[in-house]
Amino acid sequence: MTSRGSKVTARPSSEARAVARTQTLIKGTGGIGTVRRTTLPGGLRVVTETLPSVRSATFGIWAHVGSRDETPALNGATHYLEHLLFKRTGRRSALDISAAIDAVGGEMNAFTAKEYTCYYARVLDTDLPLAIDVVCDMLTGSLIVEEDVDVERGAILEEIAMTEDDPGDCVHDLFAHTMFGDNALGRPVLGTVDTVNALTADRIRRFYKKHYDPTHLVVACAGNVDHDKVVRQVRAAFEKAGALKNPDAQPIAPRDGSRTIRTFGKVELLGRKTEQAHVVLGMPGLARTDDRRWAMGVLNTALGGGMSSRLFQEVREKRGLAYSVYSYTSGFADCGLFGVYAGCRPSQVHDVLRICRDELDKVATDGLTDDEIARAIGQLRGSTVLGLEDTGALMNRIGKSELCWGEQMSVDDMLAQIAAVTPDEVREVARDILGRRPSLSVIGPLKDKQAARLHDVVA
């Protein structure tokens, strides 16, 4: 088969091989922390970070597909597919796949998010070729047969049931629906019982072929690795599967868009016979590409990111109204969320919500103190570094960066961005984000009078 004069077969010509483009994106010291990217003919990107001081390596493949790419009828298909890629390929059974990694003491898993999916294996550096072969085989050679779809359906329905039994987890899905409504970002990643039951092998197989093209994939590998060797092994695996068919194909660009979330003052209550009421109070946040995200990170840390944060001190330390209380941000390509979570006795839910709302209003109006901001900057810088001290975290960082931003940032540059945040920038983003009318999601056994008062919190 030919395309624009470049011959592509199971064993590509040297001319086709010469098309691969390699760049050094971050130059480390003595090779440590060096990040390189090679774009193969066919549009597949391979990104590595070298850390010679460790004896492990984590290999992952990121797919540019998440639950927001699903239609209502396909809700849950991305996650369903994640399960099925572990079931069977043309070369391996489900047991063969798991046994290969278990036999070398490795770890293998995957996760599905709103905008991407990742499959990875962490092994000893000497076993990296095995991990590359297994994971690449899963991504390129999955069979998606009816028998496996039927078997895995039961496991996924159990996973949905498990999530439903954990209201502290389920309330975040409810909050996404409260904020985004019945669209792709507002629907659960796992899907629902009805949508999972309706999915067929044929529909999932078509979804797989559409979204797992090499142009939609990023290979990421971190640890005691040699970039050129990883590229050769990945290329051989994809070519063996016949996956690099079009040498002129280009990688898909990071997501963009102009979505504007304008959900204010909405309340959703899910009645459950639980011992605690679980609440999320929040508002639209920032897209992950927003330049203000560094200031937002400092604001989030100061508000609810640790034991010295405003919310932890006011809700738990001073009043003992909740065991768990924190704030968080979620950034997507074109929008975001900011939320405050708390779990408390149902009789205390209005006190907890009143305190949280009061603190958000105070920070929106008066800002944080210089001491709070300085402490949050220090905490954020430290947690950033400590969170990257294993090869799995490094693989996640470079893989997600390539897929979502199309570029890499060194840890030193990240720390510099955090350190450069000024009190005025934090106060400005606080006025913008926290000054908006919030929405509220609650799961718990609230009585009618308690439920009726929830709207007062967001008024």
Image (cartoon, grey):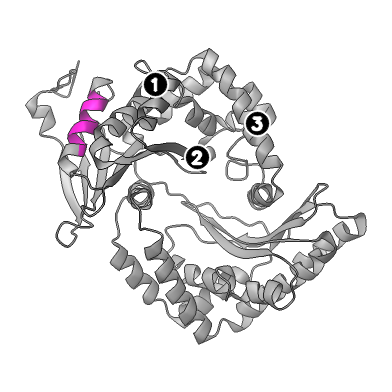
Pick the quarter of the image with the C terminus.
bottom right
Q: Residues within 10 Å of mark 3 (few under 14, many from 20)?
A: few
Q: Secondary structure at mark 3?
A: helix
Q: Residues within 10 Å of mark 1 (few under 14, many from 20)?
A: some
Question: What is the x, y in percent for residue 216?
Answer: 36, 36
Question: Tag 1: residue type?
Answer: Asp
**How far is the residue under mark 3 from the one under mark 2?**
17 Å
In the rendered image, which quarter is residue 34 located in?
A: bottom left
Question: What is the x, y in percent for residue 46?
Answer: 25, 41
Say whether disc 3 or disc 2 marks the residue closer to the N-terminus: 2
**How far is the residue under mark 1 from the one under mark 2?**
23 Å
Q: Magenta span: helix, strand or loop, mainly?
A: helix
User: Label 2: which residue?
Assistant: 112
Range shown magenta: 230-239
Magenta region includes residue 231: yes
Q: Nearer the viewer, mark 3 or mark 2?
A: 3
Q: Nearer the viewer, mark 1 or mark 2?
A: 1
**How far is the residue under mark 1 from the one under mark 3?**
24 Å
User: Label 3: which residue?
Assistant: 158
Q: Residue furthest left?
A: 14
Question: Horizontal placement of 437 versus 151: left or right?
Answer: right
Pick the quarter of the image with the N terminus.
top left
Question: What is the x, y in percent for residue 56?
Answer: 29, 46
Question: What is the x, y in percent for residue 298?
Answer: 48, 72
Magenta region includes residue 201: no
